[in-house]
């Protein structure tokens, strides 16, 4: 795991399929990465679902997926991911 101040966010989205695809691309190119998933449908301490969920949010898009790479690899990773996205 990289230290937060030594990494940079290279991608964020709400598609698990795209997140997995991009993780694979980074692995194939030997780029180390960290990832994180944030669930926006979490309940609060009293069991209520947060405001976003109460507004009838689509559960398929309730998670946000993040990819981080080291600051040294950021430009290379961004270039590779942009090229892969066009294919």
Image: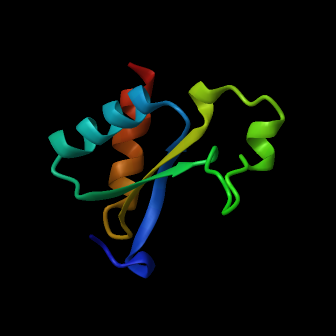
- Quadrant location of residue 52? top right
**Relative to residue 6, is residue 49 depicted above or below?**
above
| Residue at the far top in the pictured view | 87
6 vs 53, left or right, is left
x, y percentage for residue 70?
33, 67
Q: How is the image coloured?
A: rainbow
Which residue does the image show at 57% across and 25% down from the upper left? Answer: 60
Q: How many marks?
A: 0
- Quadrant location of residue 24? top left
- Quadrant location of residue 7? bottom left
Which residue does the image show at 61% across and 37% down from the upper left? Answer: 62
x, y percentage for residue 65?
48, 45
**Relative to residue 43, is residue 3 depicted above or below?**
below
Residue closest to the eye, 81 or 45: 45
x, y percentage for residue 26?
26, 45
Instruction: Specify the quadrant that holds the C terminus.
Output: top left
x, y percentage for residue 49?
71, 46
Instruction: Specify the quadrant that holds the N terminus.
Output: bottom left
43 vs 72, left or right, is right
């Amino acid at each position: 795991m990289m230290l937060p101040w030594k990494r940079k966010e290279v991608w964020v989205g709400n598609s698990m399929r795209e997140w997995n695809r991009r993780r694979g691309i980074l692995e194939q190119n030997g780029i180390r990465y960290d990832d994180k998933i944030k669930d926006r449908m979490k309940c609060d301490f009293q069991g209520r679902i947060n405001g976003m969920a109460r507004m009838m949010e689509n559960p398929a898009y309730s998670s946000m997926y993040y990819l981080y790479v080291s600051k040294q690899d950021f430009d290379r990773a961004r270039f590779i991911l942009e090229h892969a996205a066009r294919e």
